[in-house]
Image: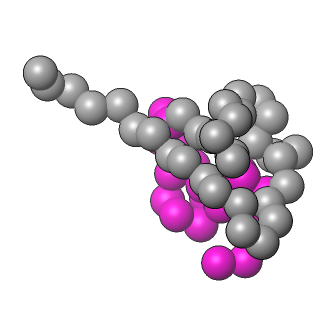
Amino acid sequence: MQATTLQTLLQELGYDERTVGTALNQEFVRAKDRAETPLREGDAVEIVTPRQGG
């Protein structure tokens, strides 16, 4: 991976066109803040996708 921000990571992983929730090191990151959220070695990234069903 070459991503330097949370937004570029989502693009690299193919999530850029999907509605997802994100957290960096257990802190929620709003969609509008992803492009300015830098990634560093050892960061823990969570990507949560909505699921339908029950």
x and y percentages locating residue 29 in the rendered image: 71, 34
Residue at (77% x, 72% y) in the render: 41
Q: Which span of residues is magenta-colored?
A: 1-20
Quadrant of the rendered structure where residue 53 is? top left
Q: Is residue 20 above or below residue 36?
A: above
Q: Is residue 25 above or below residue 53?
A: below
Q: Is residue 9 magenta?
A: yes
Give the side of residue 29 with respect to residue 15, left or right.
right
Q: Is residue 27 above or below residue 40?
A: above
x and y percentages locating residue 8 in the rendered image: 71, 59
Check the picture and name the quadrant holding the N terminus.
bottom right
Kindly tell me whether residue 27 is visible in this rendering. yes
x and y percentages locating residue 4 in the rendered image: 81, 65
Dominant secondary-structure state across the stretch colored magenta: loop
Depth check: 27 or 32 in front?
27
Residue sitting farthest toward the bottom: 1
Check the picture and name the quadrant holding the C terminus.
top left
Q: Is residue 43 magenta?
A: no
Residue at (87% x, 45% y) in the render: 36
Kindly tell me whether residue 31 is visible in this rendering. no
Residue sitting farthest toward the left: 54
